Amino acid sequence: MEALLGGFQADLGSISSEIKSLQEQSMSMGLKLKNRKVAELNLSRFLEDIVVPPNMIDILVDGEVNEEYVRNLQMLSKKLQFLAEDPVAKISAAYKDVEPEVEKLRLKAIYKGREFMMQKLNALKKPKTNIQILQQNVLLKYKYVAVFLQKHGKEVYSEIRTAYFDTLNKVLSAHFRTYIQALEKVQLDIAAVNDLIGVEDTRSLGLFSRSREPLKKRSSVFSLGDRAKVLKDVDQPALIPHIVEASGTKYPYEVLFRSLHKLLMDTATSEYLFCLNFFGEDTIFHEIFAGPFAVIDEHFNSVLPNHYDAIGLMLMIRLTHQHQLTMSRRRIPCLDSYLDKVNIMLWPRFKMVFDLHLTSLRSANIRMLWEDDVHPHYVMRRYAEFAASLLQLNVEYGDGQLELNLERLRGAVDDLLIKLARCFKHQKQQTIFLINNYDMVLSVFKEAGIEEGKTQQQFEELLKSSQTVFLEALLLEHFPKLIMFVKTRTGEDLASTSGQPIKVEEVEPLVKDFAERWRGAIKLMHEDVITSFSNFLCGMEILRLTLTQLLLYYTRFADAVRQIEGGAALNINLVSITSIMYEIKNYSRTF
C-alpha cells in the first residue's frame, strides 16, 4: 500500500509540473497573439493609409467628377497627408514605391479639379445663367474639389479663386449696369432746378387777371402724397424693368432707388453666404463687389448732382435706414460701409436742395409774387405741403437736424408772408390775408396727420393773434364809438372813470344807435366774414369770437349805463343780453 501510494504521489507531482508548464506556454502564446494582433492592426492601418487601390486610381484618372469621385478624392487627400506627416511611413520601404504614384495621382487630381472648376466658372459667364442655382446645385455640391485644391494645389486654388472673383465681378457689374439702364427708362422726373417754394408761378395766364393754374401735374414737388408708400414696400421684390416698361408706368426716382437696393441686398446676401461657405472667407466678397459698387457709384454720381427733389431725397435717406435695419436683421455685415457711404452722399445733397428752397423764400421778388387777392397764396400752399411732407417723414425718426432746418424755413416763409401782407392798402385786408394763409397751413398739417409739434404750435399762435386783431378791427368798423367808450370810459369805478362822471347825454346816442343798428351790423359782419375767409369753418369760428367779444363789450356798456345817475330812463332803449345771445345762437347754427 505504501509503495502504491508513493507511486500515486510521484504521478501527481509530475502532472502538477506538466500543468505548470502548460500554463506558462499558454501565457506565452496569449502574449504573442496579442502582440501579433496589435502588429496586424497597425500594419493594416499602415497598409490602408499607404496602399493605393487600383479602383481608386481608375476613378481619379478616368472617372467623371461626381459624388464617387469626390469620395475617392477625400481618400487621396488622407493618403497624401499620411505620407507627408507620418514619420514611420517616410522610412518604410513601401514609401519609396507608393510616393511617386500618389504624387502622380495628386497632379492628375489637381489638373482634373482645375478643369472641372474652370468649366463651371465659364458657365457663369453665359447669358441668362441663374448664378445662385449654379452656386447651390453645382459649386457647393462639389465644394470638396476646391478644398482639395486649397490643401494640395495652392497655386491652382489661387488661380480658381482669382478666376471666380474676376468672373463674378464682371458678370454682376454687367447685370447691375443693364438693370440701372433699364430703370432709367421708367424714371419719372419730379423736380427741376427752378421748382422752388419761393419762385413765382410763371404758368399764370389771363387777359385781365393773373389766374393761376393749380399745381396738379407737379404737385409731388412739394407734396408727399402716395410717395410714402415706398417705405411700406421696402421689402417687396425688385421691379422687373421690361414688365414695367411694357405697362408704360413711370416711377419717381426713390422707387427705382428702393428696387436697385433690394436687388443689391439680395444679391450681396446670397454671394456673401456663398463665399463664406465655399471659400471659408469674406474678403473675396469685397473683391467681387468692387465692380458692382463702382457701377452704382457712377450711377449716383450722375443722378444726384441733377436731383432737385428734396422729398425724394428724404425718402431715399429713410429707405437707406430701412435697408440698414434689414441687413442687420439678416446678420449680414457686408453692406455696412456701402450703406453708410450712400447716407453720406444723400444728406449733403438734401441739405443743398433744402437751402435752395430757403434761399428762394429769402430772396423772393415781392412785386412779382404779390396778387391783389386775400385768399391763401400759392407760395404758402407749397410751403405747407413741403413742410408737412418732411414732418411726416420725421415722425418715427425725431431727426433734430431736420427740425432745425424746418424752423429756419418757417422763419423765412413767415417773413415773406408779412412782406406780402404789407402790399395790401388796408390793415383789414392784411389781417384777412394772414389769417387765410395761417389757417391753410394748419389745415394742410392736419390733413397730413400732424396734430402736434413746434411748427404747428407757432402757426396756431400766429393764427390766434391775427384773429384777435381782425375781430377788434371788425367791431371798431361797425361800433367805433361804443367800443372806444367801453375802452376809455368804463373801468372798475364806472361812475368816475377818467376823473369825470359819465352823463346820460354822453351815453344816450350810443344806446339808441346800438338799438337801431345792432342786428343789421351783425348781418353785415356775417356777410363780411363769409366773403373774406376761404375756409368756411375758420370764418365761422372768427364770427363766433367776434360776436362773443361784442357781447362782452355791450355787457360792460350796459352795466355802465345802469350805474349812471338817471340812467334808468335809458333802460327802455337798452338791448337785452338775452336778445343778443339769441341772435348769436341763430348764427351759431350755421357754424
Image (cartoon, helix red, strand yellow):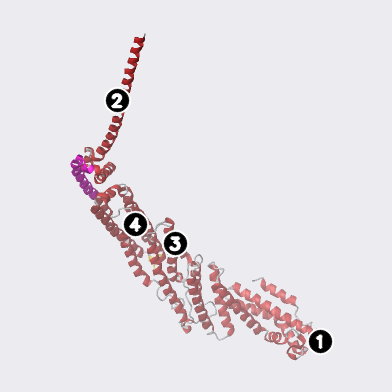
Report the residue marked by disc 1.
566
Q: Position of residue 128 (x, y in %)?
A: 30, 54
12 is higher (above) or lower (below) than 418: above
Q: Which mark is residue 25?
A: 2
Whichever of labels 1 and 3 marks the residue nearer the N terminus, that label is 3
The residue where tag 3 is placed is: 322
Please say whether residue 114 is one of the residues in the magenta stretch.
yes
Q: What element does badge 4 sit on?
A: loop
Query: What residue is rendered at 32% in x and 65% in y?
Result: 294
Find residue 282 and name its label. Answer: 4
State which tag comes first along the sequence, 3 or 2.
2
Magenta stretch, main secondary structure, is helix
At mark 2, the secondary structure is helix
**Closer to the camera: disc 4 or disc 2?**
2
Magenta part of the protein: which range?
A: 89-115
Say which amino acid is labelled 4: Asp
Residue 458 position in % (x across, y down)? 56, 75
